[in-house]
Amino acid sequence: MNTPSEIKKPAIGLLVGGIFLAVIALVTLLMMIGNRVLRDLMGALSYVYGFYVYGLALLAMSVFAVLGAVSMIKGRGYGMAMTGAICSIVGGVLTGLPGWILVLPMGIWAFVALRRPAVKTLLKRDSTHPQTPS
């Protein structure tokens, strides 16, 4: 099935945003794992664990964003695509300036595209009636 460009372009944007979000999450986790001095200076153990939770949450949101983008590109799975767009929006807000510049606009673009009635119908129809290979 050829996915219309009204879905494919925002899906590629969502994919790029999801990958960028994963990079931010991995950098956050690697900084906390590798920076023993910072952990010693902070002293508050719960504060340090908060960064681990933050990094893991961003990583989970990036996985959902990428899976949502793949669902959009394949042209099936409206629920997964919408979950990916929402995770991209939330992740973009949580990351600060880098996320506001790239991740947030891509998530909003995908969300707006998914709200169109024709796109909803296409993605819901294809997810409930899978095509059989001929």
Image: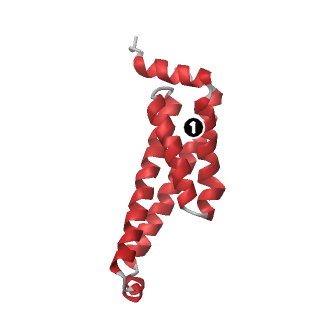
Q: Quadrant of the C terminus?
A: top left
x 41%, y 70%: residue = 51
Q: How is the image coloured?
A: secondary structure
Q: Position of residue 32 (x, y in %)?
A: 40, 74
Q: Say left or right for 111 vs 34.
A: right
Q: For mark 1, does the 10 Å Cα neighbourhood hold few (<14), some (14 to 19), or many (20 or more) residues?
A: many
- In the picture of the structure, the residue carrying the numbered disc 1 is 11
Q: Report if residue 134 is visible in the image.
A: yes
Check the image and report above or below for 34 versus 69.
Answer: below
x 65%, y 29%: residue = 6
Q: Position of residue 133 (x, y in %)?
A: 39, 15
In the image, 64 versus 48, the foreground residue is 48
x 54%, y 19%: residue = 121
Q: Secondary structure at mark 1?
A: helix
In the image, 79 versus 14, the foreground residue is 79
Q: Position of residue 36 (x, y in %)?
A: 37, 83
Q: Report if residue 130 is visible in the image.
A: no
Q: Position of residue 99 (x, y in %)?
A: 59, 58
Q: Say left or right for 51 vs 24.
A: left
